[in-house]
Image (cartoon, rainbow, N blue to C red):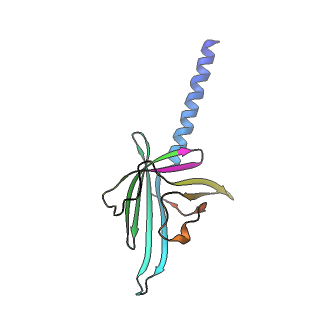
């Protein structure tokens, strides 16, 4: 009876480990969010692209966040934690190409949540300390980031 109990316990732990690995691997990859702010009075396009690369690190998931475009150069390194269908992204440090330093280590930048709507997976974004460049995009709970296929 003890052997059967131990085998059941080992199988349960193995199954839980498989679920954690699957959940983590579902978030790996590159995501992009493009902001269109129109044009300046001189006709120059006001456009900013945010890219997040979710990678496996030694101690869990790492998020490399780059924001580039009109008067924007952000380069952040963050940690990412999975809670159910959510990915919580916390500031860790600044990258080499960062211009403005406004975050403290541990700040919750934003949360991404996977939702299935009509059989299609969507990624909702809930902003915290990291906000879009243009106020029209600051509403939380909407689809902003799209996973970039092939990366």
Q: Is residue 57 above or below residue 110?
A: above
| Residue closer to the observer: 126 or 21 | 126
Q: Is residue 112 magenta?
A: no
Visible residue check, residue 151: no
| Residue closer to the observer: 12 or 104 | 104
**Residue 50, position as x, y percentages in the image:** 44, 64
Q: Is residue 97 above or below residue 61?
A: below
User: In what quadrant of the picture does the N terminus appear?
Assistant: top right
Of all residues, the one furthest to the left in this rendering is 96
User: On the image, which quarter does residue 118 sit in?
Assistant: bottom right
**Residue 55, position as x, y percentages in the image:** 42, 48
User: In what quadrant of the picture does the C terminus appear?
Assistant: bottom left
Of all residues, the one furthest to the top in this rendering is 1
| Residue located 34% across and 61% down the image | 98
| Residue located 56% across and 24% down the image | 10
| Residue located 58% across and 53% down the image | 113
**Residue 24, position as x, y percentages in the image:** 51, 44
User: On the image, which quarter does residue 51 sit in?
Assistant: bottom left
| Residue located 40% across and 82% down the image | 44
Q: Is residue 110 above or below residue 17?
A: below
Q: How many marks?
A: 0
| Residue closer to the observer: 26 or 68 | 68
Q: Is residue 90 magenta?
A: yes
- Magenta span: 82-91
Visible residue check, residue 121: yes
Of all residues, the one furthest to the bottom in this rendering is 42
User: On the image, which quarter does residue 41 sit in?
Assistant: bottom left
Report the magenta stretch's main SS. Answer: strand
**Residue 20, position as x, y percentages in the image:** 54, 39
């Amino acid at each position: 009876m003890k052997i059967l109990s131990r085998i059941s316990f080992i199988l349960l732990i193995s199954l839980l480990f498989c679920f954690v690995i699957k959940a983590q691997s579902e978030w790996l990859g590159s995501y992009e969010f493009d902001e269109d702010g129109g044009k300046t009075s001189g006709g120059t396009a006001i456009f900013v692209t945010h890219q997040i690369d979710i990678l496996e690190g030694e101690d869990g998931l790492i998020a490399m966040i780059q924001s580039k475009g009109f008067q924007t150069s952000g380069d952040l390194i963050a940690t990412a934690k999975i809670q159910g269908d959510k990915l919580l992204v916390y500031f860790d440090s600044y990258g080499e190409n960062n211009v403005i330093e406004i975050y403290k280590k541990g700040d919750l930048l934003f949360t991404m949540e996977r939702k299935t709507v009509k059989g299609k997976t969507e990624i909702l974004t809930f902003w915290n300390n990291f906000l879009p460049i243009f106020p029209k995009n600051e509403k939380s709970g909407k689809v902003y980031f799209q996973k970039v296929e092939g990366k």
